[in-house]
Amino acid sequence: MTTTATRPGARARAAIAAKTLRTDRWWLAPLITVIGLGGWVAYATVRVFMHKWYWVEDFHYLTPFYSPCITDRCVPEAAHFGTYLPGWWIIPEAAFSLPFLLLFRLTCYYYRKAYYRAFWMSPPACAVPDGHKTYGGETRFPLIFQNAHRYAFYAAGIISLINTYDAILAFHSPDGFGFGLGNVILVGNVVMLWAYTISCHSCRHIIGGRLKHFSKHPMRYRAWTFVSKLNARHMQLAWITLGTLALTDFYVMAVSAGWFSDLRFIN
């Protein structure tokens, strides 16, 4: 075994040729992240540019992937806020919301950790060398835009309000009040989206991060405590919402395409 010394007179230490001494499957978590995020992005991209099967007229179901629907290709009943963009193939129906949602997710503290490790190998795991020779942090282009997360949070809040509005409208079909499995899925997705959004680190800071005396702001302290509990589950909520978004979109697509009928409980 060869040895190296850190400075004159210091005790020599072993020169380890291996990149890491970890013997566990440290590569499994990054691999799962690549498969999970890669698969979800592929599905979402295909769905966004299909330009069909996003609206169920009988029950007013609108998939969140197409909300708000603002191109002149949108079904009039699904365009709750009007149509402002031309219906070119390259323009998604939800061109207003998708860029902000993408920015919110890309700059999310958890997702940054996830794709830094899984896709950039920077670093892939603890006690495993970085896949890059140099590291410039998030102070230069393009990673300097990660600082826009706090602003993307406000946009995500507005979009969550729109999704909530869509879920409420889905209870009022052309035949009056109705309730089906699609409503359960839409509402469940909205609840999870709100949980993920307000569990954001930026939201936690906005509510109580700048207060000097919690005793003088009891309501904000309670809100901060609640958000802090959600913040501890931010990673789980990040993955759960990917699942609920895909499930909601697939269900609306399947019912709209006529692959199966919506299970109705009332009307």
Image: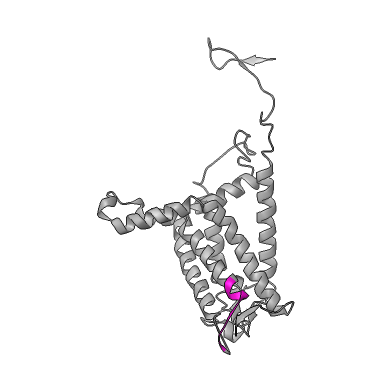
In the orientation shown, which residue stands out farthest toward the top? 9
The quarter holding residue 87 reads: bottom right
Q: Position of residue 179 (x, y in %)?
A: 57, 79
Q: Which residue corresponds to the image point at 30% horizontal and 51% vertical from the top-left?
A: 211
Q: Residue furthest left?
A: 216
Give the quadrant of residue 55. bottom right
Confirm whether the magenta stretch covers residue 183: yes
Residues in magenta? Answer: 176-184
Quadrant of the image for the N terminus? top right
Residue 218 location (% of width, % of height): 29, 56
Q: Position of residue 257 (x, y in %)?
A: 72, 79
Q: Position of residue 262 (x, y in %)?
A: 66, 78
Q: Kindly identify the residue that appears in the image at 53 percent across and 68 percent down.
A: 190
Q: Quarter of the image holding residue 37? A: bottom right
Quadrant placement of the C terminus? bottom right
In this picture, is 163 found above or below 235? Answer: below
Q: Is residue 13 visible?
A: yes
Of 29 and 174, nearer the camera is 174
- Coloring basis for residues: one colour
Near-viewer residue (45 or 21): 21
- Kindly give the residue lying farthest to the front in the view shown: 265
Q: Is residue 70 magenta?
A: no
Q: Is residue 142 at least partly visible in the picture?
A: no
Q: Residue at x 61, y 60 (%)?
A: 242
Q: Is residue 176 left or right of residue 258?
A: left
Q: How many marks?
A: 0
Q: Is residue 188 above or below residue 240?
A: below
Point 64% across, 15% down: residue: 3
